Image (tube, grey):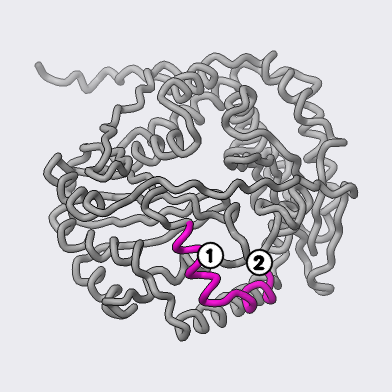
Amino acid sequence: MSLDRKTAPAIHSAIEFDYILPGINEQALSNGLPLYWLNAGVQDVVEIDWVFPAGLWYEQKQAVSQAVAGLMKNGTSKRSSQEIHEALEFYGATLKVSPNNDFSTVTLYTLTKHLAALLPIVYEVLTDAIFPQEEIEIHKQNAIQRLMVNLRQCDFVANQKIDAVLFGDAHPYGRYTQKETIAAFTREDLLSFYKQYYDLGNVKIFMAGKISADDVKILDGVFGQVAAATTALPERVFAVETAADKKMNLINDPDGVQGAIRIGCLFPNRQHPDFAPMVVLNTLFGGYFGSRLMSNIREEKGYTYGIYSSLAPFVNGGSFTIHTEVGRDVIEPAIKEIYHEMNVLQQERVDEEELLLVKNYLLGNLLGDLDGPFSIIQRWRSLIMNGMNEEHFNRNIRIYKSITAEELQVLAQRYFNIGDYHEVVVV
């Protein structure tokens, strides 16, 4: 049957599609370690993530989590830092360690055929890192130098301060690195954190790519043959101490011509029933280039090159923040317009055309997240590490598709009360 090139194909909105999260295999390695894996894709590549409860939440001493992540690859009892990096480079592989507020993820990207050669090296890094003192000193010097450079930038300082204002500077989600905390930690601090929180007994492993059961056996042959009993983590409880003063104004550069604005409030994490509806409201308000904030403050007023709002969900809490940089002379007008857009969403219902555009944007991006093994496994990883399952994903899809203008207005009335927000302005 020949193609009819005179008739355009039908155009479908993203909202019309079915969104099915492809299933994954869940099994235990020989020693009981949990593995979640997905065989998909056409290229002979694989991603493996080892996820540990080793984020800022578990630090006994500040700056240690970042330092351990930065130095794990810099030497074991069998290989030097140079030998580890040369081996990875020889096989064209990438090994990175990414710490965040709650977890730390060690990620290997490689051609599937090199798994047998590379997994023993990763095992060494995860179980036998020695943190040479000379490497620690280099790390400290570099970290302090980067910090000093970053502290000259008003946006960097504003990001630090808004978290501290919302959670308190003693809270893991609110404290920020300082020169003194970098200088203070010792090799013993790093080894202690590494041994306790990078314990294989507490790891979850995620594996995706063009792989087979044979490749899983290779992984099991390295990581499934050692004793790895789950160890109890110490309970960590922190009080949120939100600042009483709603406004903070800092002069970081007396000659600065630009000011960084952060306006934020605490917001529940992914488990809260309002989180998924808020994803839609956030997208409409400031979550994409066509948002209300962007249309007003960038396109109409010309105050900024970009302004966005975002949700930051963590395991033990979260926040909602508006962030932008504007000319020093228009800081107050920009803040006024941000609050104006909040008020409009409280007072007026979104028209159906705009709401449909936002839904299509949100769901269209989600289609990209379901395309390819690495994106799919990351979606599963987020669900599993937050104690959620496929039904949570399906529920979110239903909300994204069906939420009404009336429901968004009620949500705005609940969460866009100006008196609940803190402002941080750094010039």
Range covered by the magenta-colored residues: 177-196
**How many residues crowd around disc 1 within 10 Å: few (fewer than 14), some, or many (20 or more)?**
many
Q: Horizontally, is 328 left or right of 159 in the view? A: right
Q: Are marks 2 and 1 in contact (CB under 8 Å)?
A: yes
In the rendered structure, the answer to whether residue 264 lies left or right of residue 101 reads right
At mark 2, the secondary structure is loop
In the rendered image, which residue does mark 1 sit on?
66
Does the magenta-highlighted stretch encompass residue 6? no
Q: Is residue 140 above or below residue 122?
A: below
Q: Secondary structure at mark 1?
A: helix
Residue sitting at x 56%, y 27%: 358
**Residue with the mark numbered 2:** 177
- Residue 11 higher or lower than 122, as above or below: above
- Residue closest to the eye, 403 or 126: 126
Q: Amino acid at mark 1?
A: Gln
Q: Nearer the viewer, residue 146 or 15?
A: 146
Q: Is residue 369 above or below residue 112?
A: above
Is residue 304 in view from this perspective? no
Q: Position of residue 150 (x, y in %)?
A: 64, 70
Q: Who comes first in sequence, dot 2 or dot 1?
A: 1
Q: Residue at x 80, y 47 (%)?
A: 241
Q: Quadrant of the C terminus?
A: bottom right
- Residue 295: image x %, image y %? 67, 38
In the rendered view, tell whether residue 20 sits above or below residue 68: above
Left or right, 99 with respect to 5, comes to: right
**Coordinates of residue 31 in the picture (x, y in percent):** 26, 45
